[in-house]
Amino acid sequence: SQTIHQWPATLVQPVGSPLSLECTVEGTSNPNLYWYRQAAGRGLQLLFYSVGIGQISSEVPQNLSASRPQDRQFILSSKKLLLSDSGFYLCAWSGGGKQPQHFGDGTRLSIL
Amino acid sequence: GENVEQHPSTLSVQEGDSAVIKCTYSDSASNYFPWYKQELGKGPQLIIDIRSNVGEKKDQRIAVTLNKTAKHFSLHITETQPEDSAVYFCAAILGGTSYGKLTFGQGTILTVHP
């Protein structure tokens, strides 16, 4: 069966520091991958999606970037974190464009 | 822009009662509608979904109904239990996207009192 892993579960970072969040999927090949941000436990906003290795599309302008160095690995990064980057970050995968999306358990990021 | 509206924002029921959450969408080309349950500190979990070629789908105590003409879909939970307490999100894949962009409702906090 397919599984999705995100780490770390929680992260506290100072303003201006770099960021790297990792997401990996097991049990499937060539998945669509997604990064979402959830503010205050409500409403998910799509940040990035990827349909293949090295293919990244951004949904909203922001201080973050994403990369997909391997088929089942998706990374969310920042060179310099802002206070407004605080939130709950969720990775998801699906088997194709209109297939169900399955979420990881997220990373809670706090910026001090 | 295209969006999904979800109501109510909070719902409180007694154990054993039914709970209904409703969502409306604006894009008539939308054709896939999942529902997610999110428990505290966890990621959303898919609980049921429906495609536009059917009007109703059931899975034990949960069901989803879709009215494409009125552009709304609803989640029905029968015989609610305290463990059903969570935040529930509806979503829709808007018709114009090929990569499966989900547009989410704002969520409903369901509390089931024992």
Image: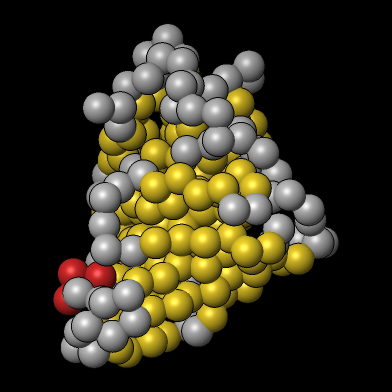
User: Which quadrant: the C terminus of chain A?
Assistant: bottom left
Location of residue B62 with respect to B112 vertically, above or below: above
Nearest the eye: B60 or B55: B55
Q: Position of residue B114 (x, y in %)?
A: 43, 70
Res B107 visible: no
User: Which quadrant: the N terminus of chain A?
Assistant: bottom right
Q: Residue at x 49, y 28 (%)?
A: B97
Q: Does B6 sit left or right of A46 as displayed? A: left
Q: Position of residue B56 (x, y in %)?
A: 60, 26
Q: Position of residue B100 (x, y in %)?
A: 54, 36
Q: Does A103 sit left or right of B24 as displayed? A: right
Residue positioned most to the top: B69
Q: Position of residue A19 (x, y in %)?
A: 38, 79
Q: Residue at x 32, y 75 (%)?
A: A79
User: Total number of numbered labels?
Assistant: 0
Q: Residue at x 46, y 40 (%)?
A: B102
Q: Residue at x 42, y 10 (%)?
A: B69
Nearest the eye: A64 or B40: A64
Location of residue A16 with respect to B15 vertically, above or below: below
Nearest the eye: B14 or B61: B61
Res A14 visible: yes
Nearest the eye: A23 or A81: A81
Q: Does A45 sit left or right of B44 as displayed? A: left
> Colour mode?
secondary structure
- Residue B74 is drawn in which quadrant? top left
Location of residue A4 with respect to A44 vertically, above or below: below
